[in-house]
Each structure stands twice: as C-alpha cells, then as structure tokens.
Image (cartoon, rainbow, N blue to C red):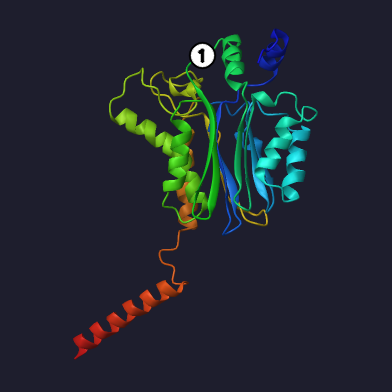
Amino acid sequence: MKFTISFLLLIASQVHVEATFTVAATDTATGQQGAAGCTCVVPEAVSLYNHYHSVVGKGVLLSQASPPDADSPVYSKAHELLSAGQDCDTVLQAITNDTSLDGESSIRQYACVDSRGNAAGYTGAGIQEFYDVLLSLNGEEVQPHAQVDEQGSAGSVFYSAQGNIVSKNTVPLLSDGFEQAEGCDLAGRLFRSIVAVDDSNNQARANGSSEDTNFEGDVRCENGIGEGIIPGYGYPGLQAYIHVEDVNGNEVLHIESLPEGGVNPYDEIREKYAQWRLANPCPSHDYSSNANAAQFSMVVGMAVVALATIMI
C-alpha cells in the first residue's frame, strides 16, 4: 500500500503512533468479560483504556494501531452486530471490509471476543509500511517490530492477544501467560498475561543482559526510546490497565497506571492488583461438586476416627 505524503503528514500531526499490546477475553461460565493492555504512548496523550469497547453481556472489541476516532461509525456498527448476537468473525469482517465505514482499515488492529467464546483478530496489511514511514517522519528510530494477533482458550475462558510495533515474542508471552495462569478467575488470567511480558524483561536484566538486548513489549520503549526511559533498561510500555466486568456490566476490577516521567507502569499495576486480590481472594477450596464433597467427607471422617483413637 502506498501512502501519500499529505496523508502521512496529516496523520503525524494529529495522532500518536499507538503501538500497543493487549489481550481481550470472555468467560463463558461466569459471563465476565474484559481486557488488559500496555503501550508506550505517553498517558498525557491518551488513555489506552479509551480503546476498550464493551457490549454488556455480549462481548468486547479492542481497537489499536491507528484506531478510528471515538465517534467513528465503526464502533456503532460493531456494537449493533454484537448486540444482535453476531459472532466476532462477522463483526470484524463488517468493520474492515466496508470502505463506507472506514477507508483506512489496513492500518488498524482489532480484537473481538464474544460471550459464546468466539474470538477473532484483525491486523491490517498496511500497518508495517505505515509505521516504517511514520516513525521516520517523526524522527524516531525504525527498529524491527511485529504486528500480529492470535487467539486461544483455557477452560471456559476465550481470548485474543495482539500487538503492533512490538518485539516478536511479546504476543506469544501474552498468550502463554494467559493460558498458563493459575488464577481462579478472568482477572487473574488477564493480570498474568500482561505481567508475563514484564517478567521476561526482569529475567533478562537478572541474567546480565547488555544495553543491546531487545526487551519484550513496545519496541519504542524497550531500548530507552520512550521519553524519560534509561537506555538499556527499557520498559514494556508507559501505561497499562486491567478491566473486568460481570454479565450485567458491573465493574469487577478496574486498575490503571498512568504515571508521568517514564515510570514503569507495571509497578503500580502489580501493587493495585495485589490490593484487589487481597480483598477478593480466590477460594482455597471448592466443595460444591460431588467429587469434592465426597473428598471432604472422607477427610472429615478420617479426622473423627483419629480423634476417637486418641481419646480411647
């Protein structure tokens, strides 16, 4: 795809390059839905959470890369289709193939996950070229980067993970973190998904990685390109969030880190999540099922016998 100089200059003057990595998910067992993400876009420019779009009890849509304006008909169309029970493949095809809705879908990235567990992603074919040119126009160093999306599931939870202008291992880390999480709920999986990227960087530093090491995350932050970042000790991004809502749209969890001055947002995200988890602990045991009830009865019975033996 070829971009005219006038178009690129217009875009460069109006928007920030929204390099981002996110994960969107729904839990078909509980009806919960939500997302988490991180970006190197400075918080003063825009909150990444602004690009989270929810249809209560039906699903979520995330927009990133160079997302449409907030009043774009793209979002109302997606809302209409999700509300009507259309699956995510249908939703994404509708908002990316219709040029009357959006003539620049090739530079967008979307994720959609519905309440029935259908997950889909869209990564525009023009993103790579667009960013290479736009970063050059902005005077930023052009580094190797990936634009990718992938979908998966873990039990009753279905997700779509995606990233643009990210290092090649970022999205696989999101997926692995999500699927391998030992958390008891959607919030736990979303948390483990995005912190997996930061954990990878912390491990690299612990191993004595040099300044030339490519850390995971937004490539503009990883090597100190973001404002206020120390070269060689980059962060995955400059802002981050986690959001979960129940089937009725009530907030289950919302934590956001919008620090100033190039501070690692993960420090605040970890602290806020730990506080929330303390107030909303995972159940240590679940004796609701027949199998667990039987096991519980057996344990109690053994304890009674042991006590009786001691008393005798």
From this view, report whether residue 46 is shown above or below residue 29.
Answer: above
* Residue on which the image places disc 1: 142
Q: Is residue 304 above or below residue 161?
A: below
Location of residue 227 in the rendering, given as x and y in whole percent from the top left corner? 51, 20
Q: Secondary structure at mark 1?
A: loop
Any part of residue 294 in sight: yes
Which of the 4 image quarters holds residue 293?
bottom left
Report x, y in % for residue 98: 76, 30
Task: Name which residue lies at 36% across and 74% down.
Answer: 295
Vertical order, 100 against 22 (above or below): above
Residue 208 vs residue 21: left or right?
left
- Quadrant into which the N terminus falls: top right
Q: Residue at x 41, y 18 (%)?
A: 231
- Does residue 10 appear to the left or right of 279 in the view shown? right
- The image quadrant of residue 5 is top right
Q: Residue furthest bottom?
A: 312
Spot occupied by residue 244 in the image (x, y as percentages of width and height): 58, 49
How crowded pointer 1 is (Cα within 10 Å; few <14, some 14-19, many 20+) is rated as some
Can the viewer see residue 260 in this picture? Answer: no
